Amino acid sequence: MKSSFLLPIVVSLVLFGAGCSNATPPTPTVVSTSTPITQPAVVSTSTPMVEQPIPTVTMDSPQKTVETVGADVTANVNVTVDPLQSNGVVWWILPGKQNVIINDLPAHAFTVTEKAPDNGSGRVFGPLMIGLASRVDRLLTQNGFKKNTLNSSANLQDFSLYDVIQAYQKDKTICTFLINGDSGESVSMASFQCADTDRLAQAEKEQLPFLKLVQNPFDKTDRNQSVVISDIQYYPPLFATVAVNHRRTGYSAILKKINGAYKQISAGQEAPDCTVVDKYEIPKEVVPECYASGVFLRKNTQ
């Protein structure tokens, strides 16, 4: 059996989950009105909490925003709120439709336990999840955040981004409320995470040059408008490897500087063929093993 080579991480963006720049932060496109989150009513067997009015609060940084949302949800929605964590992930679509990812962010994870209605697809959320999404939406929009439609699902039945996502921005803070698209019929997972636009600019500067270079080995028509560069490893002076991810799947690519510029020389989910390793003199620090005639692994001798 072939072993995995640099298998990229699966980006779920739900707390189960590269960069350096001082560039001027970009300004993501935002819309000034918030779209209400609605879904057909279902019967809940859970005891609802008494929801309090939306408070006026100060949310002037990613950390403060996440802390405020976590505290408000804890007090007003009958769901389990995990302690504040620092492994949040924001996947952000830029106005030019390129995608970047920001890791290691302040975040809260939410667990919603309820029997969701069966519509035949298994991807319908019950009143607790609808209430959670609505509460987060109203807390943010009534305190000055704007909905970012480019990064948001149309509604709770829109899985075009795989997960259901509601994205927001206020000044230099961007946030996503994400419902895991792999949630089960009785337990649903969600998360809320925020980043500042300095981190967004940093991710854009580091990731976009590689995004322009990689080519999907499984789909030659893929123009990289739905993937991110989730990890970059440099092997000076000539080599680099990158993990390329869709919302769940992905592959790894090896690049070499040829005439002073990086060029993709191999890509896939397994170790490259030894003929590629030998041709481009890929060192064993980059590829410890390779496939001889595509049949068996041998140690890289470069």
Image: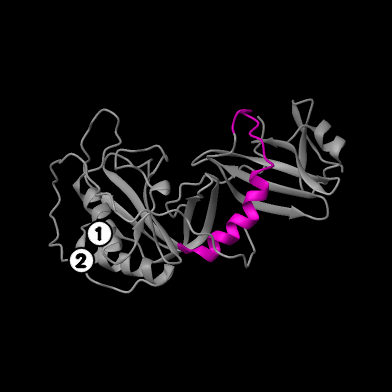
Determine whether 203 is above or below 42 in the image. Answer: below
Give me the residue at 59% from left, 32% from top.
Answer: 222
Q: Which mark is residue 138?
A: 1
Where is residue 127 shown, x and y percent of the image?
19, 47
Where is residue 191 shown, x and y percent of the image?
37, 55
Specify whether residue 212 is painted magenta. yes
Q: Amino acid at mark 1?
A: Arg
The residues bearing labels 1 and 2 have C-alpha atoms spaced at a distance of 7 Å
Q: Quadrant of the C terminus?
A: top right
Read off the magenta span: 195-222
Q: Which residue is mark 2?
A: 54
Where is residue 37 shown, x and y percent of the image?
25, 48
Q: Secondary structure at mark 1?
A: helix
Q: Which mark is residue 253?
A: none
Res 1 quadrant in image:
top right
Give the crowd class for mark 1: few <14, some 14-19, many >=20 residues within 10 Å: some
Q: Amino acid at mark 2?
A: Ile
Determine whether 24 is above or below 259 in the image. Answer: below
Q: Choose the circle earlier in sequence order: 1 or 2.
A: 2
Give me the residue at 35% from left, 71% from top.
Answer: 59
In contact (CB < 8 Å): disc 1 and disc 2 = yes
- Decide if residue 71 is on the left or right side of residue 280: left
Res 201 quadrant in image:
bottom right
Determine whether 238 is above or below 249 in the image. Answer: below
Where is residue 24 shown, x and y percent of the image?
58, 65
